[in-house]
Amino acid sequence: MRRLGLLVSLLVAALITTGCGTQTDEVNVYSARKEALIKPLLDRFSEQTGTTVNLITGSADALVERMKAEGEHSPADVLITVDAGRLYRAQQEGLLAATSSQELDRQVPPALREPEGRWFGLSVRGRVIVYAPDRVDPANLSTYEALADEQWADRICIRSSDNIYNQSLVASLIAHDGEQATREWAEGLVANMARDPVGGDRDQIKAVAAGDCDLAVVNTYYLGMMQADQDDETRDIAHRVRVFWPNQDGRGIHVNISGAGVAANAPNPDNAQKLLEFLVSDESQQWYAETNHEYPVRPGVPTSELLQSWGEFKQDDLPLVKLGELNADAVKVMDQAGWK
């Protein structure tokens, strides 16, 4: 089956490059984001430019492996995924091209893009603390580091150590506090877990609402989607928790991105760059905020009323490329701490 899939990809690539290697009026997107969270923007790009967008969705790891298997014959023009750690992995595999774009450099802050232009942030989410207001006084909350304090023993829910969001959070702590201090923090966090890690971010929110734990570490995007859900029960669960912005007296909250890069072997690199530039336009950035409940990468672009209801916050300006560079160290620290 794998050989058959590769053969199909090679045939697609051959069709794309027919015509003496000239670019076609299309762009081929490999997206680890669910179709509903990206296709409306791709359709709008097609309407405005006349460029056909061919979309393939899948898990980030599967798409990276596919691009590696396809090699120089890959039809992929753009890779879209979430978390700078994943984008860094694709970069290290040689799958993303250095892209020179004044528009992307102007619109995407330096901390939210790879210095050589191999990937760019498209939207921002914070990894924050959510808590049960009937059981937690927010005055007792302060920093990520303070989650290791004894007062939170048996009160914290968080995803497993194999989750890239947590790996990136730990990588950011290593960047700021050093490896030894972060290892001690991770040991304290593990000791304070109310249960072994299980489920995704939505499950952590549900666990706080159900009383299984008093606070959790989650991405803002998930809470926003739940609070805006059409299902009454889901909305009710999500509104039983509150958002706390850690480290506001210091560096600010840890943020991460959904992002994209032009594929190293893109048959349509010009269209790929145009698509990335469209995805950081006013229209696209506002759509992310209103529909996906993510924060724009561009300062000054309005957010949704839901996001505004959580209040303003200071965010960490650590270059996100550090999350990829320190990922292996983060995984080691988590393993040593017994983080399952």
Image: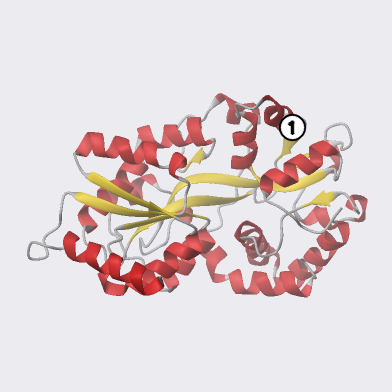
Q: Nearer the viewer, residue 57 or 160?
A: 57
User: Do we see residue 103 in this rendering?
Assistant: no
* Residue drawn at (79%, 71%) of the image: 337
Is residue 332 found left or right of 24 in the rendered image?
right
Q: Position of residue 292 (x, y in %)?
A: 51, 36
- Is the N terminus in the top left, top right, bottom left or bottom right quadrant? bottom left
User: Which color scheme did the rendering employ for the protein?
Assistant: secondary structure
- Residue found at the far left of this picture: 20
Q: Can the viewer see residue 276 in this picture?
A: yes
Residue drawn where x is 71% and y is 28% of the image: 233
Q: Is the C terminus in the top left, top right, bottom left or bottom right quadrant?
A: bottom right
Horizontally, residue 85 falls left or right of residue 77, namely right
Q: Which amino acid does label 1 sit on?
A: Ile
Left or right: 76 in relation to 338? left
| Picture mark count | 1
Local secondary structure at mark 1: helix
Q: Is residue 17 above or below residue 276?
A: below
Reply above or below: 287 against 277. Answer: above
Residue found at x 31% / y 37% = 43
Nearer to me, 107 or 134: 134
129 w.r.t. 60: above or below: above
- Residue 291: give x, y in percent of width and height: 49, 32
Q: To which quarter of the image does residue 9 belong?
A: bottom left
Q: Position of residue 144 (x, y in %)?
A: 75, 53
Residue where numbered disc 1 is placed: 237
Q: Where is residue 130 in the image (x, y as percent from the top left)?
A: 74, 41
Q: Crowding at label 1, few (<14), some or many (≥20) Cα neighbours within 10 Å?
A: some
